[in-house]
């Protein structure tokens, strides 16, 4: 079942991350809407979604390092597992190279779970940092 909707529980409170997430959700929805009306989305849409996700991962990881995020390794490992899954997604495109509904469902489920479970924790942690002294400092 397809369920990507931008809802308040997807908001992390980190503006740049939330903008990226909103864009990814919108792209997934636009592609899904195309399927609903019988238009197979162009294959570049999948590439665009995956590039945006990868850039978001890089930004999140930089932020986690800057803030000494205690769950950095687990969060980073989840990103890396998904990067590997991206390779699989590319290889599972249909013969014509088009995006399939099955691939959108995979993205949908992963995005919903990752944002709600992992990125929400990062957002809460960053939100708790009340002063620059809370950031990692090198001597």
Image (spheres, rainbow, N blue to C red):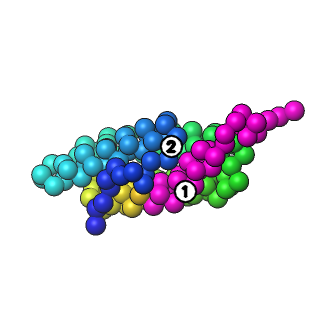
Residue segment shown in magenta: 113-139
Characterize the magenta stretch by its predominant secondary structure: helix
Residue 58 location, x and y as percent? 57, 41
Disc 1, SS: helix
Where, by quadrant of the figure, is residue 135 drawn? top right
Q: Is residue 57 left or right of residue 104?
A: right
How crowded pointer 1 is (Cα within 10 Å; few <14, some 14-19, many 20+) is rated as: some
* Sequence-wise first label, 2 or 1: 2
Total labels: the figure holds: 2
Query: Would you identify the image quadrant in which residue 127 lies?
Result: top right
Q: CA gap, disc 2 to disc 1?
A: 13 Å
Q: Nearer the viewer, residue 121 or 37?
A: 121
Which disc number belongs to residue 13? 2
Q: Nearer the viewer, residue 48 or 67?
A: 67
Residue drawn at 49 percent across, 36 percent down: 16
Q: Indicate whether residue 54 is drawn in magenta.
A: no
Q: Which residue is mark 1?
A: 118
Q: Is residue 135 magenta?
A: yes
User: Label 2: few (<14), some or many (≥20) within 10 Å?
Assistant: some
**Residue 30's disc number:** none
Q: Is residue 130 left or right of residue 13?
A: right
Tell me where residue 101 sits by quadrant: bottom left
Q: Residue at x 50, y 43 (%)?
A: 13
Extreme-left residue of the structure? 37
SS for tag 2?
loop
Residue 74, visible in the rendered structure: yes
- The answer to whether 80 is drawn above or below residue 131 in the figure is below
Q: Nearer the viewer, mark 2 or mark 1?
A: 2
Quadrant location, the N terminus: bottom left
């Amino acid at each position: 079942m397809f369920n990507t909707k931008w809802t308040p529980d997807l908001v992390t409170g980190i503006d740049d991350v939330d903008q990226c997430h909103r864009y990814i959700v919108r792209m997934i929805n636009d592609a899904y809407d195309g399927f609903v009306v019988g238009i197979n989305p162009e294959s570049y849409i999948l590439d665009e979604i995956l590039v945006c996700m990868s850039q978001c991962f890089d930004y999140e990881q930089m932020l986690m390092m800057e803030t000494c995020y205690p769950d950095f390794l687990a969060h980073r490992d989840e990103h890396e597992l998904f990067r590997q899954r991206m390779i699989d997604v590319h290889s599972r495109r249909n013969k014509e190279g088009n995006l399939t509904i099955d691939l959108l469902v995979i993205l949908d489920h992963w995005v919903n779970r990752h944002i709600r479970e992992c990125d929400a924790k990062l957002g809460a942690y960053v939100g708790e940092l009340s002063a620059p002294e809370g950031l990692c400092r090198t001597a």
